[in-house]
Image (cartoon, coloured by chain):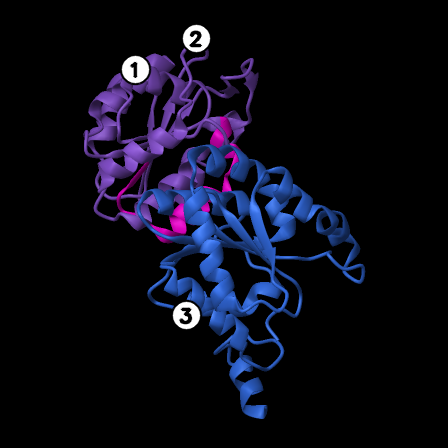
């Protein structure tokens, strides 16, 4: 444990709870199996493990964005160039990027795999997350987009099914991750 | 310089093998009507994202030149994008901003480009070359003299011009033919 903390202090890996996340490793492997070779997004603490995995993966071209809309544009460009992009963000930022999903990805039929942290879905979260937390699933439903809230699923199977759905519909799909998903 | 002249100058000088990404509103509509081509990507919605899409394309296909035709208000809407472009230094990216100082596709309400100093901003965030062009001749020189991206051309134009262009609507078809053009 002491060694782990030392690693963190040295910035060797970004593990705030002192442990590497096996679930993030599995998610990483699962999206790689589906061909993900490009990533962009805006960080969220809930996603820190998977972002770290992606950043450390030399086979994934990782172009972080300043804002979630920008990430949607960068991911769209990468897709048009033949990449299989991942976009990651907090659900608050999903609202900011919602028009870009609606007016770029949907009419152009650009399938992007989104990993979205799901803040405010439980009442004990910070007040600024509660409105978007309560509306996230309704936002995606109202756009006619598929999503899954990770809840005890087998990550390998789930990611495979989501990519299948994404390729069939040619629309973005969204994996929503609640706080503590990585444990 | 008029919008028509700026667009004609750019579109006749850009090599037919190069990618063109054009911003929302009359700029995309004029290009679609007069210079439609498989190599074009129009951004009719998601205003501001042309440069982000261009970045995603440029980093994903380093052997293709990417020309982004942006507008002043579009750029202001996603200003963080030039920081990301400056950070990643895509050598194959030419970012042209057609600046009429207004939301020309709306009712020509003024934008804030007159006080934005785009040329200085672009240099400060790391563009390799910044040129200002206020005539067709200057714009022609600026485009021909592209050396190493990211380069930035600020093309100053007058307000006004034709407005009754048809709209690019079949975006999924435009995507498919673009991806065939690339591969």
For mark 1, name the chain.
B
Chain with purple colouring: B
- Quadrant housing the C terminus of chain A: bottom right
Q: Which residues are magenta?
A: B73-94
Same subunit: marks 2 and 3: no
- B117 vs B148: above or below: above
Query: Between marks 2 and 3, how big is the CA–CA gap?
Result: 50 Å
The residue that disc 3 covers is: A56
The one of B63 and A174 positioned closer to us in this rendering:
A174
The one of B118 and A3 positioned closer to us in this rendering:
A3
Tell whether A113 sits left or right of B147. Answer: right
Residue B4 locus on image (x, y percent): 34, 13
Q: Which mark is residue A5?
A: none
Q: Residue at x 42, y 69 (%)?
A: A29
**Sequence-wise, which precedes: disc 2 or disc 1?**
1
The one of B177 and A160 positioned closer to us in this rendering:
A160
Secondary structure found at label 2: loop
Tell me which corner region of the image, top left, top right, bottom left or bottom right, holds residue B120.
top left
The residue that disc 1 covers is: B34
Residue A71 locus on image (x, y percent): 48, 47
């Amino acid at each position: 444990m002491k060694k782990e903390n030392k690693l963190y202090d040295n910035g060797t890996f970004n593990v705030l709870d002192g442990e590497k996340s096996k679930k993030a490793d599995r998610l990483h492997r699962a999206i790689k199996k589906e061909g993900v070779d490009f990533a962009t997004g805006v960080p969220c603490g809930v996603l820190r493990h998977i972002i770290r995995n992606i950043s450390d993966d030399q086979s994934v071209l990782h172009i972080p964005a300043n804002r979630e809309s920008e990430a949607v544009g960068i991911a769209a460009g990468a897709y048009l160039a033949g990449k299989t992009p991942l976009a990651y963000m907090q659900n608050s930022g999903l609202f900011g990027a919602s028009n870009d999903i609606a007016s770029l990805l949907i009419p152009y039929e650009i399938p992007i795999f989104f990993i979205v942290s799901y803040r405010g879905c439980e009442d004990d979260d910070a007040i600024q997350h509660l409105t978007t937390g309560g509306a996230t699933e309704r936002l995606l439903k109202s756009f006619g987009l598929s999503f899954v809230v990770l809840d005890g699923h087998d990550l390998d199977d789930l990611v495979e099914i989501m990519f299948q759905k994404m390729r069939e519909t040619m629309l973005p799909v969204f994996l929503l991750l609640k706080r503590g998903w990585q444990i | 310089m008029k919008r028509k002249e700026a667009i004609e100058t750019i579109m006749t000088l850009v090599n037919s093998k190069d990618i063109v990404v054009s911003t929302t509103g009359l700029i995309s509509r004029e290009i679609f009507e007069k210079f439609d081509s498989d190599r074009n990507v129009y951004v009719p919605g998601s205003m501001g994202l042309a440069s982000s899409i261009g970045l995603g394309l440029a980093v994903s296909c380093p052997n293709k030149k990417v020309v982004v035709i942006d507008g002043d208000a579009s750029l202001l809407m996603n200003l963080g994008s030039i920081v990301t472009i400056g950070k990643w230094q895509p050598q194959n990216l030419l970012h042209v901003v057609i600046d009429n100082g207004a939301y020309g596709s709306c009712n020509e309400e003024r934008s804030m480009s007159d006080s934005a100093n785009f040329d200085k901003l672009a240099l400060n965030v790391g563009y390799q070359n910044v040129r200002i062009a206020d005539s067709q001749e200057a714009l022609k020189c600026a485009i021909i003299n592209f050396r190493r991206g990211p380069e930035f051309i600020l093309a100053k134009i007058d307000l006004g011009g034709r407005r009754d262009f048809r709209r690019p609507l079949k975006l999924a078809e435009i995507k498919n033919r673009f991806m065939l053009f690339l591969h």
